[in-house]
Amino acid sequence: MVLLELVRGRRNCLFQSSGTGNDDTDGNEKCFNSISSEERMVYFPQLALQMHKKMRYMELADPRLEGRVRSEEVEKLVRVALCCVHVGPTLRPSMANVVAMLEGRLPIAEPRIEALEFLRSYGGNVSEASSKLTKVGCAE
């Protein structure tokens, strides 16, 4: 989760107002409060999985990076992060392997999609959220 938060530059949930397309700019604190009837939560790991399936990694990057990050770097972080949240603990890489993948001493593992489908039970509609994130620059 920490790697995904680093990619995005925020906590792993995002609240969006329905119909406005605007993201809550102070969503970090609201992640732990109730959701109003006009808002819904987008669970970032679920969105990261969807964007991984589509190979659209740069849409996940913190917009404050303003192009100072390469797609390959974002892809590496997202792939490693997704491997770390596999539903089964035995499928997750050890911390030593995570460090080795990030340092380039081990090849980056491929996340097992079937071990990540549990993410679908969190958050809202990912395809709708991804289009809104793209329109507003992935929410600052």
Image (cartoon, rainbow, N blue to C red):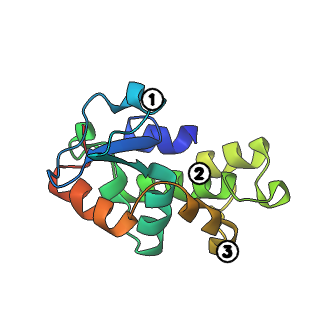
At label 1, counting other C-alpha atoms closer than 10 Å, the crowd grade (few under 14, some 14-19, many 20 or more) is few
User: How far, Cα to Cα, is label 3 from label 1?
Assistant: 31 Å
Q: Are marks 3 and 1 in contact (CB under 8 Å)?
A: no
Residue 129: image tag: none
Residue plotted at (40% across, 75% down): 54
Q: Quadrant of residue 126?
A: bottom left
Question: Where residue 125 sits: x, y (%)?
Answer: 38, 64
* Observer-nearest of 114 and 106: 114
Question: Where residue 4 sits: x, y (%)?
Answer: 50, 45
User: How far, Cα to Cα, is label 2 from label 3?
Assistant: 15 Å
At label 2, counting other C-alpha atoms closer than 10 Å, the crowd grade (few under 14, some 14-19, many 20 or more) is many
The residue at which mark 1 appears reads as 33
In the rendered image, which quarter contains the C terminus? top left
* Observer-nearest of 65 and 118: 118
The residue at which mark 2 appears reads as 81
In the rendered image, which quarter contains the N terminus? top right
* Observer-nearest of 40 and 109: 40
Establish if 1 lies above or below 119: above
Residue plotted at (17% across, 45% down): 22
Q: Are marks 2 and 3 in contact (CB under 8 Å)?
A: no
87 relative to 22 in the view: left or right: right
Amino acid residing under circle 2: Ala
Q: Quadrant of residue 71?
A: bottom left
Question: Where residue 68 sits: x, y (%)?
Answer: 27, 43
Amino acid residing under circle 3: Glu
Amino acid residing under circle 1: Asn
138 relative to 85 in the view: left or right: left
Establish if 114 lies above or below 75: below
Can residue 31 be seen in the rendering of this structure? yes
The residue at which mark 3 appears reads as 114
76 relative to 104 in the view: left or right: left
